[in-house]
Structure formats: C-alpha cells, structure tokens
C-alpha cells in the first residue's frame, strides 16, 4: 500500500499523455500540424479531467482499504506538480494560502489607494470619496441629507457588500451621497456581477463608476460593449464611466487614468452638480463632457 502514490502518478501521467495524443491526432490518424492556443487549452482540460477520473477509479479499486480522500489528495498533488513543478503538499497549501491572502489584501489595498488618490485630486472641491464602512458610519450617525428612499437603498448596498466606495458631495451644511464606486484590480472573471449592480445604481439615479487596474480584458470587444452599450447583446451602458490605469483602452465611457486622477475629478464635479440640480435627468444615459 505504501506505493500507491507512485501508482497514482503512473496512471495519471500515462492517461493524460494518451488522451492528449488521441485528441491531437483525432479520428484521421494523422497529427494536426497546427493547433491554436485555444484548442490546446481545450485539449489540456479534457486530458486533465480524463486523467483525474481514471486515476481515482483505478486506485479506489486497487486499494479498497485506503480512504478515497487520501487518494484524491495524492492525485491533487500530482496534478499541481505537473502544472507548477511543486510536489510537496505543505508547500502547495502555503502557496494557495499566500495567493488567497494576496487577493484579499491587494483588493482592499487598491480600494484604499483609490480613496487616497481621489481625496488628493478632490482637495479643493466639495466632494469626497469614502469607503463603504465610512458611509455606514455616516448613515448610522444621521449625517446624510439624502431622502429616506436613498438611505434605505444605500443600506441595502452596504448589507450586501455591493460597492467598494461612495462619492459624497457637501452642499452648505448638508452632505449627500450621490455616487457608487467599484474598484477592481481586474474584472475579467466577474464583469457581469459588477455590471448588474452598477446598472441598478444608475436606475436609482446615482452616479456609478468603476476603477480598474488591469484593463487587459478590454481587448475583447464584448467587454467594451458591456461598458459602452449600443450592441444587440448590451444595448445600454454598464457604467457612467470606467477609469483604467492605461492609455490603451480609451473608448467612449472608458477613460485612461493617470496618478493625478484629473479626469475623474472633472467628471465627479460634473456629476455632483447635475445630481444636485437635475437629478431627475441623472439616468443611465448621463455622460460626462
């Protein structure tokens, strides 16, 4: 029974290699000369699934006294080793933990960065950018002059942890929340989940914008249309504006963002003024000039 890991590895590797060969050769019996990167990825995924399935079935049958969870873990280690070169379970766990920690900490750090740079840019204006927890404190302290319907809607967003930051405008002795802000290092995998609450915010007559650090996903026209709208699939824009830390992707409502946040500041001032004076017209179609 001590050799089950070696048997695991042999079955996994041979099954993976054989499946790749079959899929590359295909039914013609001749190896394809050129394979696109997309096709190569599909072949790898199919081979991985077949290797995992075949290995776990054969090992459970061959070692009935061994807990299936132990076999599954061994296959996991073999799979990760093939992909990364790491073959130690504890090291794998540390890498995964570090990655999860990075995702959590880096996301919050980016929120704080947006708040900090936004505050610097808006120093001489009547506008401030606050974190969700700051808005929650304001609402509980009764410091916002928004109508009760707004307050109720904002509370729902906070409870559901929808937006990362909010835009506040000072008018005389009052403070109003007029904008909802998302900040994402990258949104390729969750752009739809980000877009839907933004549309809901615009339909509730709030300014809705998003900051994105990595705009690589905008190489795909589909994602551009999710921002700007005007396509059959996405007839309406998903945000009033998207601010990207890159010059590459400028297009209508997609704006390049520099460290001075100057473009964002100009748009925030326009949005606040319109929201205060013509909120009934501050709908999804509004766009900064």
Image (cartoon, rainbow, N blue to C red):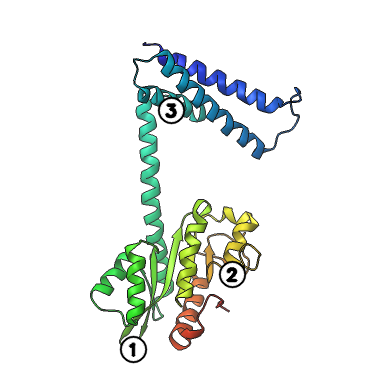
Choose between 20 and 275: the one closer to the eye: 20
Residue 261 at x, y percent in the picture: 48, 69
Label whose residue precedes the other's in the sequence (3 or 1): 3
Q: Residue at x 51, y 77 (%)?
A: 266
Q: Secondary structure at mark 2?
A: loop
Choose between 16 and 243: the one closer to the eye: 16
Label whose residue precedes the other's in the sequence (3 or 2): 3
Quadrant for the C terminus in the image: bottom right
Residue 29 in view, yes or no:
yes
Is the residue 136 above or below the residue 98 in the image?
below
Q: Tell whether 194 sits left or right of 176.
A: right
Q: Residue at x 66, y 24 (%)?
A: 22
Q: Residue at x 40, y 25 (%)?
A: 72
Residue 260 in view, yes or no:
no
Report how far apart the C-alphas of labels 3 and 2 lie in the structure. 44 Å
Quadrant of res 124 = bottom left
* Badge number at residue 236: 2
Is the residue 118 above or below the residue 13 in the image?
below
Q: Residues within 10 Å of mark 1 (few under 14, many from 20)?
A: few
């Amino acid at each position: 029974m001590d050799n089950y890991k070696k048997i695991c590895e042999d079955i996994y590797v041979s099954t993976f290699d054989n499946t790749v060969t079959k899929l590359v050769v295909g039914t013609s019996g001749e190896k394809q000369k050129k394979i696109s990167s997309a096709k190569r990825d599909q072949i790898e995924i199919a081979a991985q699934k077949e290797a995992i399935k075949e290995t776990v079935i054969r090992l459970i049958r061959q070692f009935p006294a061994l807990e299936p969870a132990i076999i599954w873990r061994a296959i996991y280690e073999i799979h990760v080793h093939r992909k990364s070169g790491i073959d130690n379970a504890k090291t794998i766990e540390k890498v995964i933990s570090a990655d999860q920690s990075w995702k959590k900490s880096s996301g919050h750090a980016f929120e704080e960065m947006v708040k900090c740079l936004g505050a610097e840019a808006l120093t001489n204006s009547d506008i401030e950018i606050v974190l969700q927890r700051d808005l929650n404190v304001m609402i509980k302290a009764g410091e916002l002059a928004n109508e009760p319907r707004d307050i109720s809607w904002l509370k729902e967003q906070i409870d559901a942890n929808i937006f990362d930051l909010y835009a506040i405008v000072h008018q005389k002795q009052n403070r109003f929340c007029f904008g909802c802000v998302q900040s994402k290092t990258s949104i390729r995998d969750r752009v739809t989940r980000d877009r839907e609450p933004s549309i809901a915010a615009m339909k509730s007559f709030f300014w809705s914008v998003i900051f994105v650090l990595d705009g690589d996903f905008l190489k795909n026209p589909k994602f551009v249309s999710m921002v700007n709208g005007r396509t059959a699939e996405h007839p309406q824009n998903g945000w009033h504006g998207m601010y990207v830390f890159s010059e590459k992707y400028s297009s209508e409502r997609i704006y390049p963002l520099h460290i001075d946040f100057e473009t964002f500041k100009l748009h925030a001032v326009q949005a606040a003024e319109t929201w205060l004076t013509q909120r009934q017209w501050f709908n999804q179609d509004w766009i900064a000039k």
